[in-house]
């Protein structure tokens, strides 16, 4: 028996096979590599040489700071013999391939920087960047494994007035850098610092309209601060809306990156954001501007995922709707470029089907649809997505709620 809430595929004539371009092939080659394997941080999983390095680093810290020395990071006393301290120290060791002296120097510099920068208190400061919150850099939801996700999008700085307002002089630039660190520190506050727990975040960077030349100074400083003071804090770096020339640049600088760093990269071409993000993040946690269902201050009701093949039409039937009930639904198809419609089909045979939303073509940049319908009689709602004019398979998701009539 068919599940009435499951998509029902109605194949149409299939178009000719899709031929990949040279750029597409390059982009895929950049993405097809062994996935990054995150540390578990269980000391029992360490090699003998790694355990020795961990103990030597602890000994160096004790010798330099003493049992009563100020040696804390993210609220964790690094000289305490506990698993949280081990997680932090292992991050610095991993960043320097377990070279103890290099790891110790990196840790010392980081401790000094955090004290000078007042990094422990930056999360509570009001830095006055309200217009950038939820736009340029922000924490939003979690991935499928539970990692907090940080989104970055610098396309707004294509506007010269906005650029001058934020980066117009060195004082403004330094204030922006402090705000960007604030966003990261708030994300880190969500981590467990526990073996087997969630000990890193996901970075999603939107390269659409990013002014490369103008942001070079700020980008380099942000990158330097992150690399020097936040080792192994990012489990995966997802680049979306990547322009065609990025693949050429990647083929040039890729050989100079370590395999561990490259294994964290996921590269997605323009128009494929939803398709890429859904692999790692559930649709209800992906912001609407990237092909998800998540809106600010919205309820995180789980969504059902499905795919729409090239040359196919899919109908989603929501049955069991009673008279007077109000149905609210969200629906999105990554990279739309197809036809969508919604109709209510009454149970009574002598009743007419009602066109709730007439068929219309949706553009590739269209955000998720949200609509409501109150039925006057019992029946079902049918949501249709018609992809018969496209050769491309597309990811999609929907969810709905039904509020019964309050009338007796």
Image (spheres, rainbow, N blue to C red):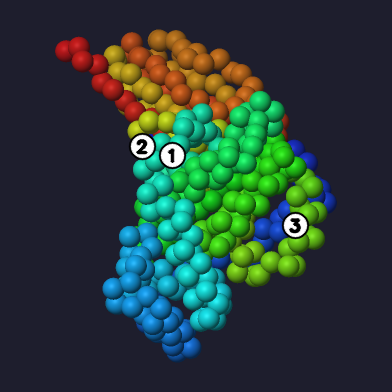
Q: Identify the element where label 3 is drawn.
A: helix
Q: Can see residue 203?
A: yes
Quadrant in the picture for the N terminus: top left
Q: Horizontal placement of 62 versus 252: left or right? A: left
Compared to residue 153, the image places residue 347 above or below, namely: above
* Crowdedness near tag 2: few (<14), some (14–19) or many (≥20) residues, C-alpha within 10 Å: few
- The residue that disc 3 covers is 250
- On the image, numbered disc 1 is attached to which residue? 284
Count of numbered marks = 3
Q: Earlier in the sequence, mark 2 or mark 3?
A: 3
Between disc 2 and disc 3, the foreground one is: 3
Question: Is residue 131 rendered to the left or right of residue 5?
Answer: right
Instruction: Name which residue lies at 47% across and 15% down.
Output: 356
Badge 1 density bin: few <14, some 14–19, many ≥20, Cα 10 Å: many
**Real-space CA distance between mark 2 and mark 3, rounded to the nearest whole angstrom:** 38 Å
**Quarter holding the C terminus?**
top left
Which x, y percent locates residue 365?
63, 29
Q: Which residue is rendered at x = 54% and y = 51% of the image?
A: 203
Tell me residue 72's x, y (percent): 35, 65
Identity of the residue drawn at 33% across and 60% down = 75
Q: Is residue 12 among the parts visible in the rendering?
A: no
Cβ atoms under marks 2 and 1 closer than 8 Å? yes
Q: Closer to the camera, 360 or 215?
A: 215
Q: Is residue 156 left or right of residue 384?
A: right
**Which image quadrant is residue 265 in?**
bottom right
Q: CA–CA distance between discs 2 and 1?
A: 7 Å
Q: Secondary structure at mark 2?
A: loop
Q: Is residue 89 above or below residue 399?
A: below
Residue 36 horizontal side relative to residue 400, left or right: right
Q: Which residue is mark 2?
A: 301
1 or 3: tag closer to the N-terminus:
3
């Amino acid at each position: 028996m068919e599940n009435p809430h499951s998509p029902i595929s109605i194949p149409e004539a299939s178009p000719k096979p899709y031929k990949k371009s040279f750029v597409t092939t390059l982009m895929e080659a950049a993405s097809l590599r062994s996935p990054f394997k995150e540390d578990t941080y269980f000391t029992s999983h360490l090699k003998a040489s790694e355990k020795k390095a961990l103990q030597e680093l602890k000994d160096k810290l004790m010798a330099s700071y003493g049992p009563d020395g100020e040696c804390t990071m993210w609220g964790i006393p690094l000289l305490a013999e506990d698993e949280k301290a081990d997680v932090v120290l292992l991050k610095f060791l991993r960043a320097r391939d377990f070279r103890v002296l290099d790891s110790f120097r990196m840790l010392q510099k980081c401790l000094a920087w955090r004290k000078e920068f007042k990094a422990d208190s930056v999360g509570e400061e009001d830095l006055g960047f309200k217009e950038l919150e939820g736009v340029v850099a922000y924490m939003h939801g979690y991935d499928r494994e539970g990692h907090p996700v940080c989104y970055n999008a610098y396309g707004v700085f294509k506007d010269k007035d906005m650029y001058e307002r934020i980066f117009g002089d060195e004082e403004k630039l330094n204030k922006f850098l402090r705000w960007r660190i604030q966003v990261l520190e708030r994300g880190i506050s969500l981590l467990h610092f526990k073996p087997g727990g969630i000990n890193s975040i996901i970075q999603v960077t939107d390269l659409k309209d990013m002014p490369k030349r103008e942001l070079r100074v700020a980008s380099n400083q942000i990158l330097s601060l992150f690399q020097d003071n936040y080792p192994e804090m990012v489990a995966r770096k997802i680049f979306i809306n990547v322009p065609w020339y990025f693949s050429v640049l990647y083929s040039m600088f890729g050989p100079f990156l370590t395999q561990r760093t490259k294994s964290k990269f996921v590269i997605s071409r323009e128009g494929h954001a939803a398709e890429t993000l859904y692999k790692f993040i559930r649709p209800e946690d992906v912001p609407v501007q990237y092909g998800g269902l998540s809106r600010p201050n919205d309820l995180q009701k789980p969504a059902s995922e499905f795919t729409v093949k090239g040359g196919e039409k899919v109908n989603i039937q929501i049955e069991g709707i009673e008279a007077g009930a109000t149905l609210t639904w969200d629906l999105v198809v990554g990279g739309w470029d197809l036809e969508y419609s919604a109709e209510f089909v009454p149970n009574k045979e002598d009743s007419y089907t009602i066109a709730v939303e007439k068929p219309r073509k949706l553009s590739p940049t269209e955000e998720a649809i949200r609509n409501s319908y109150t039925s006057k009689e019992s029946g079902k709602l049918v949501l249709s997505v018609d992809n018969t004019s496209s050769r491309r398979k597309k990811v999609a998701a929907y969810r709905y709620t039904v509020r019964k009539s309050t009338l007796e």
